[in-house]
Image (cartoon, rainbow, N blue to C red):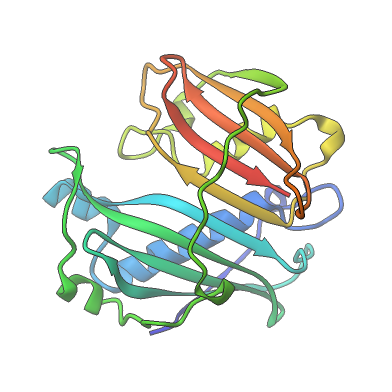
Amino acid sequence: MIFSTEFSPLLEDFDTNENLTMSSMLKYFENAGSRHSDAAGDSAIMVAKTQGVAWVLTDWKVQAKVFPRYGQKIKVETWSEGLTSAFGTSRNYFLYADNALCAEGTSKWVRFDIRAGRPIKVSPDLLDSYGPEPGKTVFGGEKLSKIALPENFSSETKILLRKSDFDFNSHVHNLNYYDFALEAIPAEAGAAFKNARISYKTALKEGDGAVAKYALVQSEGSEAKHVAAIYSDAGALACAVELW
């Protein structure tokens, strides 16, 4: 089942060039997935409250072909691939502006027992309620590669966590890590990145401090990538981000 939903962009979703930001694309993808969950009877907030279970996002890969412009109509199509491991699924996305494909993305999710603090096996019946599309993928179905962190970073930026950074699970909301990465990237690099790869490791919680470390990484045969790693004050890696 391809789930389709429309969004009415807000002024805050665009940059000074009237282009939709990558942060806003991620927001639309995530909210499209949440609407699909609601339609499948698997509401994130209600299931977390009543069953103590949640879908935990572990990875993003997003590529913008063209940035939607202010005033265009936004539509997102999303679908689950069904079981891609005993504990989770992959979800894919297309974003359209005035019916033209502008961006695509994929994400990995794990079913998580909040109270026990561990992944749990996913019932096939649960994913059947989403009308999965096995084998229908973006990026040719490639396996998401691990983000290689440099041995040394060129700078680091202290991140002051605000109450507004936390979601209903009392963790820093996953989309905020992208903003933390932008804080660490030098201003001269710009912010209109067309490619994003994000990997989540350990959630930042209330009472934690955080620091974002940055490096420009050039691998042989590939273009330079801006890499940011967000750590807790205790030194635990919370999230790694590649932008280019």
Q: Measuring from the top left, give residue 82's x and y in whole percent.
A: 31, 74
Q: Is residue 74 above or below residue 195?
A: below
Quadrant the N terminus occupies? bottom left
> For residue 109, which quarter of the picture?
bottom left
Q: Nearer the viewer, residue 121 or 179?
A: 121
Residue at (38%, 33%) from the top-left corner?
Answer: 203
Residue at (45%, 29%) from the top-left corner?
Answer: 237
Residue at (56%, 58%) from the top-left corner?
Answer: 61
Q: Is residue 152 above or below residue 48?
A: above
Q: Measuring from the top left, give residue 181's x and y in whole percent.
A: 63, 34
Q: Is residue 160 above or below residue 33?
A: above
Residue at (33%, 80%) from the top-left corner?
Answer: 132
Q: Nearer the viewer, residue 172 or 155?
A: 155
Q: Measuring from the top left, give residue 227's x and y in whole percent.
A: 66, 37
Image side of residue 101 versus residue 118, left or right? right
Image side of residue 114 versus residue 225, left or right? left
Task: Please tell me how many numbered marks the rendered image carries.
Answer: 0
> For residue 117, which quarter of the picture?
top left
Image side of residue 111 versus residue 179, left or right? left
